[in-house]
Amino acid sequence: MNIHSGRVLPLVDQMIGTRSLPVRIAIFGSRHDNWSLKNLQRPEDAETYPEFVARIRAAISGIGGGRIFAPNPVAPSTGAICQQEDLIRHIDLGGRMEMHRNQDLHADGSFLRQMGDTGIFSAGGCGMLIAIRGTSVVFAHVSRESVFDRIAVMSRGERQDESRPYFGVAEAAIAALDAKEHPDEVFAWPLFGLPPDSFEHSFEHSQYGAFNIALGEYLEAHHSRTAAPITDDAVYPDLSQLVRERLELAGVPHGQICMDHAYVPETVPTTRNGGGSARYLVAAVREG
């Protein structure tokens, strides 16, 4: 753990957002500690894991965060963005800091409505999407399953998963911002995705080969080779670029999608670079 003078220091600490609505983004973690949120679901869990609670409190307070919103982006992912009020379990982290959760609701993102509102999730290689329209901000977890409707991929676009409100998290973000008719007012930041050469989907995989073949065919038909490099043996999805392309398909101008922090730095331990099963913490704090 990266600790200095009682603070938990982030591996990544950057500012994004618009001039009037800045958002601070950060990653916490190391190869020696686990930031998985799976054991913090109910108010009483704070008493069971006091050291982890203290670590989260120190990390988030150190980047200026306040109210924490932590949706549950677990399989089966829906790509949904929930309201803050849907996160009905409030976990007291001490120091006047609360985490809002709901283990019964599968959602990949939520809103940051007030200054200090903080969105978090634990990850092993998944990215984040920040989208802003006017004074509204949403954050979302970006994974293969949140970006793409698995049933649509497997059926080559002939069917859709009826349990998903939208095809994926890009479309859900635009809807959450009430921007379907005004996508030109949206500014977006795909963040911290795996570089495509670290995200091989082999067509010969013993368990996932059939899905990987379908995914390769779907991406080849609907997306650029830049966003989904394909060889004879595998497809290499670039989720940050794929989110960008899906936002553009929905009408968000190319120049309003910032890719400055599109990829997770090498210093962050992921499942693809020897990080093992440990998770790191991704956070976004509204500062305006």
Image (cartoon, helix red, strand yellow):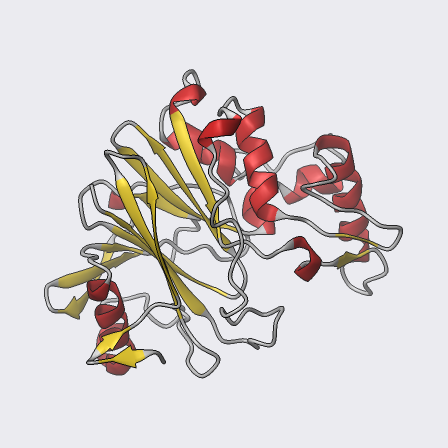
Identity of the residue furthest to the left in this view: 96
Looking at the image, residue 110 lies above or below residue 32: above
**Image-based side of 101 in relation to 265, left or right:** left
Identify which residue, 280 or 20, lies in the foreground: 20
**Image-based side of 115 in relation to 231, left or right:** left
- Residue 101 location (% of width, % of height): 30, 57
- Residue 112 location (% of width, % of height): 27, 43
Identify which residue, 37 or 262, lies in the foreground: 262
Residue at left offset 33%, top offset 40%: 17
Q: Is residue 44 visible?
A: no
Quarter of the picture containing the C terminus is top left
Identity of the residue furthest to the top in this view: 181
**Image-based side of 37 in relation to 125, left or right:** left
- Residue 32 location (% of width, % of height): 45, 83
Q: Can residue 202 be seen in this view?
A: yes
- Residue 149 location (% of width, % of height): 62, 40
